[in-house]
Amino acid sequence: MKTATLILYTAASLALGSFPVHGQNPAPPPVPASVPASVPAPVPAPVPIPAELTSSGQILVDGRLSPYVIHHLPVSSFPELPDGIRDQLDQRGCVIPQTYEAHRPENVIHASFEGSGSSDWAVLCTSEGTVSLLVFFTDNSSQPFTLASAPETERLQAHDPTGVLGFNWGIDPASPDQVHEAQADMLHRPPRLDHDALADTLVDHKIVYRYYLRSSWIVLVMKD
């Protein structure tokens, strides 16, 4: 059974500043002009991550040194970001950390966090070894909320037989229905939201829902 815990944070306390050679196959015979040639679509090669965007090292886990690798993407990998927010992230020296299971650019999301129909953004920003969860409201994008932060090396976990640790913090939009379902076992279940929440996840572990209500951020912690 899932249980949930609510935590309330005021918006003011979260405002930024108040607080990681085989030969080639023979050429096919010519195709008559009247018969269209079938050309297989080229398979795109993986885009390599520049070395300066990959951090690695060792940390002490249970008394033993364990290697880790964290991949990042530059802010420019997310062209959909509004110019003002992109400038803010560049000024902070942000790169965007990617979870060890990432298959496409992640940890930059767009949703209606402030209220129904609003156009807002949330970003995981790594700067100088610390990763922060930032939320930008459209009407005040110059003053984002910092909802959480931690050294990147505190957001690692093993994920394959090699024992190499990878980054495990991911964010996604959460619909009002998702949040309402998560609140099902609460003694005093709140009304259904009319706007999105933010799903703050440790990969393969717990989910924390964060939503904005009456000028405060509410944290709904899911537990097994």
Image (cartoon, rainbow, N blue to C red):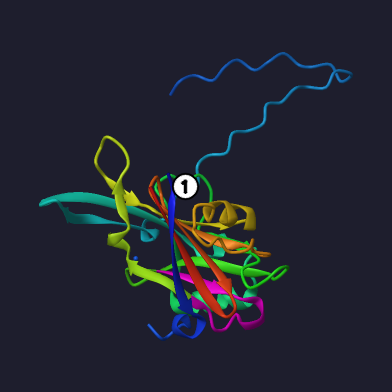
Viewed as shown, does residue 3 lie left or right of 30?
Answer: left
Give the quadrant of the N terminus. Answer: top left
Q: Residues within 10 Å of mark 1 (few under 14, many from 20)?
A: few
Compared with residue 180, is residue 128 higher up or lower down, i.e. above or below? below
**Who is closer to the viewer here, 35 or 58?**
58
Viewed as shown, does residue 145 lie left or right of 196?
Answer: left
Compared with residue 154, is residue 68 higher up or lower down, i.e. above or below? above
Query: Quick one: which residue is furthest to the front in this view?
Result: 187
Q: Which element type, helix, strand or loop, lies under badge 1?
A: loop
The residue singled out by tag 1 in the image is 102
Expressed as whole percent of the image width and height from the top left, the position of residue 86 reads: 57, 73
Viewed as shown, does residue 202 lie left or right of 103?
Answer: left
**Who is closer to the viewer here, 60 or 211?**
211
Expressed as whole percent of the image width and height from the top left, the position of residue 178 reads: 59, 52
Number of numbered callouts drawn: 1
Expressed as whole percent of the image width and height from the top left, the position of residue 193 reads: 64, 64
Query: Quadrant location of residue 70?
Result: bottom left
Q: Give the range drawn in magenta.
A: 132-145
Compared with residue 187, is residue 126 higher up or lower down, i.e. above or below? below
Residue 134 inside the magenta-drawn segment: yes
Query: Quick one: which residue is furthest to the left in this view?
Result: 63
**Who is closer to the viewer here, 88 or 171?**
171
Residue 49 inside the magenta-drawn segment: no
Compared with residue 92, is residue 154 higher up or lower down, i.e. above or below? above
Q: Can residue 79 be seen in this view?
A: no
Expressed as whole percent of the image width and height from the top left, the position of residue 101 reads: 43, 44
Question: Which amino acid type corresponds to the residue marked 1 in the rendered image?
Answer: Ala
**Residue positioned 50% across, 42% down in the render:** 46
Q: Is residue 27 visible?
A: yes
Viewed as shown, does residue 189 lie left or right of 34?
Answer: left
**Residue positioned 49% across, 19% down in the render:** 23
